Image (cartoon, rainbow, N blue to C red):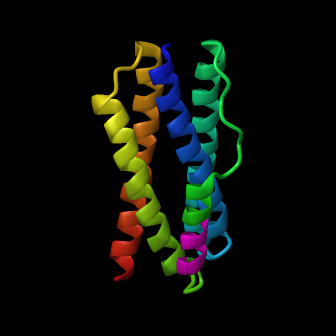
């Protein structure tokens, strides 16, 4: 893995770290048990993404980023918190915005980045998770309209 690939993987890790924080904020405002359970599973997907991508970096002799939010993460969590003030629908709408960002980043990584096959396989699996997250949240919000 070259430095460019390592830096790109680190950006995905940071994105997933920020997503975990946003999901934790949203979960505080989701009261419907089935939705809460699914959103909690998606938070765990993001945690798994962090672990898998970090393991790839470590295996290549790189140091993964700290599992703390960066400035962008504080913004995302703050946005989620503000939207969540309006309750479950607000929390889901915030997560919809967050998942659109995450999907775009993973799509770009999958389609455009020059990645080793092992890294590409992990990115592909993570991207599939992201598409599933986005689809679910869109479906839930569409039913509520």
Which residue sits at x=71%, y=39%? 66
The residue shown at (34%, 31%) is: 110
* 79 drawn magenta: yes
Specify whether 108 is left or right of 19: left
Relative vertical location of residue 138 with respect to residue 30 in this rendering, above or below: above
- Is residue 78 rendered magenta in the image? yes
Residue 85: x, y in percent?
59, 84
Q: Position of residue 83 (x, y in %)?
A: 53, 79
Q: Is residue 66 above or below residue 61?
A: below
Q: Residue at x 40, y 54 (%)?
A: 101
For residue 36, which quarter of the picture? bottom right
What is the total number of numbered labels drawn onto the structure image?
A: 0
In the image, residue 1 lies at what x, y percent? 50, 13
Q: Nearer the viewer, residue 128 or 119?
A: 119
- Magenta residues, start to end: 77-83
Residue extending farthest left? 111
Using the rendered view, name the quadrant where residue 58 is placed.
Answer: top right
Of residues 76 and 136, which is closer to you in this image?
A: 76
Regarding residue 131, the answer to whether it shows in the image is no
Vertical arrangement, residue 92 with respect to residue 86, above or below:
above
- Indicate the position of residue 100 as horizontal and vertical percent values: 38, 57
Main SS of the magenta segment?
Answer: helix
**Is residue 42 visible in this depiction of the protein?**
yes
Residue at 56% x, 51% y is 42
The answer to whether residue 141 is above or below residue 134 is below
Q: Quadrant of the C terminus?
A: bottom left
């Amino acid at each position: 893995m070259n430095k460019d690939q390592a830096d790109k993987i680190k950006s995905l890790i940071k994105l997933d770290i920020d997503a975990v924080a946003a999901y934790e904020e949203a979960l505080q405002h989701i009261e419907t048990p089935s939705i809460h359970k699914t959103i909690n599973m998606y938070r765990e997907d993001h945690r798994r993404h962090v672990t898998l991508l970090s393991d790839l970096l470590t295996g290549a002799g790189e140091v993964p980023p700290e599992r703390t939010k960066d400035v962008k993460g504080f913004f995302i969590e703050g946005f989620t918190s503000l939207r969540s003030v309006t309750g479950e629908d607000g929390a889901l709408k915030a997560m919809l915005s967050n998942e659109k960002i995450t999907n775009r980043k993973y799509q770009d990584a999958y389609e455009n980045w020059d990645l080793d096959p092992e890294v590409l396989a992990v990115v592909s699996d993570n991207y599939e998770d992201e598409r599933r997250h986005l689809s679910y949240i869109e479906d839930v919000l569409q039913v509520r309209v």
